[in-house]
Image (tube, helix red, strand yellow):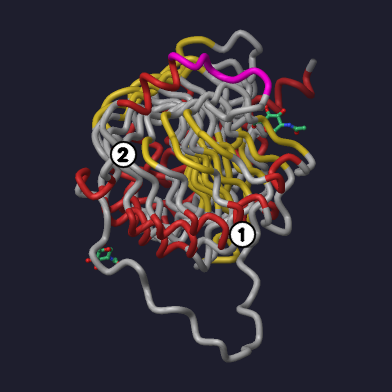
Amino acid sequence: MMKMRSYYNLNTAILALLFLAFFFSKPTLQTSSSSPYPKYPPPPPCQRLVNAYFALQAFKRSITSDPQGFTSNWFGPNVCNYNGVFCAPAPVDPKCDTVAGIDLNHAGLSGVLPEELGLLTDLALFHINSNRFCGTLPKSFTKLKLLFELDVSNNDFSGDFPSVVLNLPSLKYLDIRFNNFQGSIPPALFDLKLDALFINNNKFKSSLPKNIGNSTVSVLVLANNDFQGCLPSGIGKMGKTLNEIILMNAGLGACLPEELGLLKKVTVFDVSFNNLVGKLPESIGEMTSLEQLNVAHNKLSGEIPASICSLPKLQNFTYSYNYFCGEPNKCLSLPAKDDTKNCIPSRPAQRSAQECQAFYSRNLVDCSAFGCQSKRWPPPPPPKVSRPPPPAPKKPVASSPSPPPPVYY
Ligand SMILES: *[C@@H]1O[C@H](CO)[C@@H](O)[C@H](O)[C@H]1NC(C)=O
Ligand SMILES: *[C@@H]1O[C@H](CO)[C@@H](O)[C@H](O)[C@H]1NC(C)=O
């Protein structure tokens, strides 16, 4: 009993001193001979942990529901022992520990993110996926100059795109998918030096910014939003970095750009469930890394280009629910393919003759009428000189401490 009591007193003393350290300047505290706790000299006050204490207490107060008691040990000055809080030596002051990571994934928490979180200026990781946080990201996040991974996916955040993320110079991994963000996407998002971007399953509207190709990401998931208009031709500028692009059910219309052929590293390309029209660009046959290609559930027509079905790594080509009228035999021998519900003569499970006739009797699609094409296409053929292969792209997603959940859409 006595032991517990003194332990409690010690904690109280340290806590009180940390408060004093916060409110008064250090010299005053050290020269003061009238300290009320002479027997318990404080640890050297590391201002960062004092700030973290205030930030985390404010965070705890703004949590309205914690059914699993995840934050039940969030009291006292020892913030590095709090559930979900990770400390490391401060980069600019290695003698002092600082809060470097917060991971509250799947903690069942409700509430909002308070402005005080901006006090965690050394934060590198902030993962709160799969909770029920609402509101938006605090403006004070601009102070998180070291923030590298931000994952607020699968919550109830709403409002406009959280533009505060545009001011995070260290940000590499941004995941805001499965929330209720709405409005337009700021073009500056695609000028950031990100490695992965997930904004799928929100309520974004408006067209995709023309500078989308400025993005440095290897994974881009925009699915399940309501972007209108075309996939900008500038997408071809991502040829050196892009590995996966998921545009399923993204509200896209118009024709696919010829510049897709420049995406030599893309392994997964999914534009299913949109309103795409016209032919499949022959240039898709130049996406030499392609393994999974899904263009199903659009209004595409014409013949499937033979070059696509000859892609060396293509495993699965899904083009059902369109109006294609022909496919080379090569397509039938792919490891996996789905050509049903098209207008391909002699193939099973196609659309009815009337449906196909009605479709093809309408005016032919003029892709240039959408105003989406770049005027400089076709680009000059690549030089035939043999060169060493370019350096492998960074793989931030694989090496990230807490990998994203596997579900994309
Ligand atoms: C992004 O792309 C646009 C044109 O699409 C260009 O004018 C601009 O300079 C680019 N910005 C950056 C930061 O690269
Ligand atoms: C091929 O891709 C489609 C669409 O993504 C998927 O539904 C299907 O299961 C895949 N087939 C195989 C054999 O992997």
State the quadrant of the N terminus.
top right
Quarter where residue 285 is shown: bottom right
Task: Kindly identify which residue carries mark 1.
Answer: 89
Vertical order, 179 against 268 (above or below):
above
| Three-letter amino acid code at the position of disc 2 | Ala
Q: Residue at x 30, y 43 (%)?
A: 208
| Three-letter amino acid code at the position of disc 1 | Pro
Name the quadrant where ligand 1 sits: bottom left
Q: Which residues are magenta?
A: 348-354
Q: CA distance from mark 2 to mark 1?
A: 52 Å
Quarter where residue 199 is shown: top left
- Residue 361 forms part of the magenta stretch: no
Disc 1 crowd, CA 10 A, few/some/many (<14, 14-19, 20+): some
Q: Nearer the viewer, mark 2 or mark 1?
A: 2
- Report x, y in % for residue 404: 63, 39
**Mark 1 secondary-structure assignment:** strand
Q: Residue at x 29, y 37 (%)?
A: 364
- Report x, y in % for residue 114: 36, 29
Whichever of callouts 2 and 1 sits on the residue coming sooner in the sequence is 1
**Ligand 1 within 8 Å, label 1 CB:** no
- Report x, y in % for residue 293: 61, 43
- Residue 351 forms part of the magenta stretch: yes
Q: Is residue 78 visible?
A: no
Task: Kindly identify which residue carries mark 2.
Answer: 254
